Each structure stands twice: as C-alpha cells, then as structure tokens.
Amino acid sequence: MNDVTLVGIIMGSTSDWDTMAHAADVLTKLGVPHETKVVSAHRTPQRLVDYATSAVDRGLKVVIAGAGGAAHLPGMVASMTRLPVLGVPVESKALKGMDSLLSIVQMPGGVPVGTLAIGKAGAINAGLLAASILATHDEALAERLDAWRKAQTDSVAIDPQ
Ligand code: RP5
C-alpha cells in the first residue's frame, strides 16, 4: 500500500502470525493502510522501545499488539506511546490463552490496553475496532465499515438448517 500507514500490527513471534493475520485481513478488506512486524518484548526489547517511541512520529494512529503466554507486549507498548493500543491474547499451548488474556487485560489503572478476545475472534475484532476508531475522522472509511457490517447482517440465514 502506498498510503501512509495508519495501523501497526505487531506480534511477539512469527508463531503468532496465523492469529494476527486475521487482523491484517480485516484491515486490507476495509482499505486501511497497515504494517505487520514481529516485535518481541523479551527477545527484541530494543526493537520494542524503538517501535513504540517512534509510532506517533511515523504517523500511526492505532497499534494492535498480539502476544501469547506471559504476554507483556501490549502493555509495554502502551507504556511508551499515547496511541490507542489494542491487545490480542494469542492462544497458548499450555493454558489455551488464559495466561495471555490475564496478562493483557489486567493493566493497572493509568496505562490502558483495549483487550480483545482470545485468538482469531480477538484478532478480527481488533482490526474492526481499529477501523472504527479511524472512521470517527474518515467518512469514506465509515461508509466502507457500514457496508461491511450490512454485508455481514445480510449473510445471516434466518433458517437454521
Ligand atoms: C510470545 O511467546 C509470543 O507472542 C508467542 O505467542 C509465544 C511463543 O513464542 P514462540 O516460542 O513460538 O516464538 O512471546
């Protein structure tokens, strides 16, 4: 995409991509310029600092951060930028993502992370929520989002079988 990147989708590992790809897919469908990067809070801490502290100056408007296990990535990013940070708990093998969820959702008051559901649903909704935030100041995007929701509504069968 040639337009200025508005949403940064970051994740702690390449193993998170299968989940976080759903956020990217939603943003692609809605025509929202975005980027995807691996930024690990514990394996690449300097990359995390550089990403979070440069996000505003680079023109990003929303950050979506997905991580699993002791998922401190969203909270650490939020501590270093005033941009809205949406956290996606990635499903972990050992605890099915409950560890990721509790790590992300229980931010002490003062540094918010908007936490979504565990896994695919959370990634999809993070993409939609990022688009909703941007649509408050982008009428064309608001119309695309309305159309997306209408198509979803129209696709729901009334007959269960
Ligand atoms: C976290 O640890 C990542 O977000 C990932 O969900 C989890 C496992 O990472 P890998 O060991 O698969 O790289 O940092």
Image (cartoon, rainbow, N blue to C red):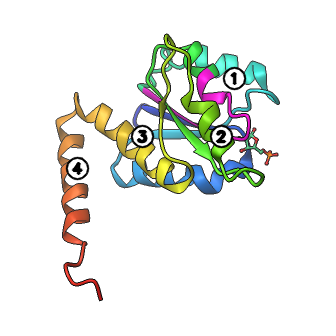
Nearer the camera: disc 3 or disc 1: 1
Q: Is residue 128 above or below residue 161?
A: above
* Quadrant location of the N terminus in the rendered image: top left
Q: Earlier in the sequence, mark 4 or mark 1?
A: 1
Residue at label 4? 144
Residue 146 rendering spot, x and y as whole percentages: 19, 50
Q: Are marks 4 and 3 in contact (CB under 8 Å)?
A: no
Residue 49 inside the magenta-drawn segment: no
Q: Earlier in the sequence, mark 2 or mark 3?
A: 3
Q: Secondary structure at mark 1?
A: helix
Report the side of 6 relative to 98 (left or right). left
Q: Earlier in the sequence, mark 2 or mark 1?
A: 1
Q: Secondary structure at mark 3?
A: loop
Nearer the camera: disc 4 or disc 3: 4
Q: Name the amino acid, label 3.
A: Pro
Please give the label number shown on residue 33: 3
What is the magenta range? 62-75
Ligand 1 is in which quadrant of the figure? top right
Residue at label 2? 100
Residue 21 rendering spot, x and y as whole percentages: 56, 53
Figure quadrant of residue 106 = top right
Q: CA distance from mark 2 to mark 3?
A: 27 Å
Residue 84 rendering spot, x and y as whole percentages: 43, 24
Q: Name the amino acid, label 4.
A: Arg
Q: CA distance from mark 4 to mark 1?
A: 32 Å
Q: CA distance from mark 3 to mark 1?
A: 21 Å
Nearer the camera: disc 2 or disc 3: 2
Q: Earlier in the sequence, mark 4 or mark 2?
A: 2
Q: Name the amino acid, label 2.
A: Ser
Residue at label 1? 48
Q: CA distance from mark 4 to mark 2?
A: 32 Å
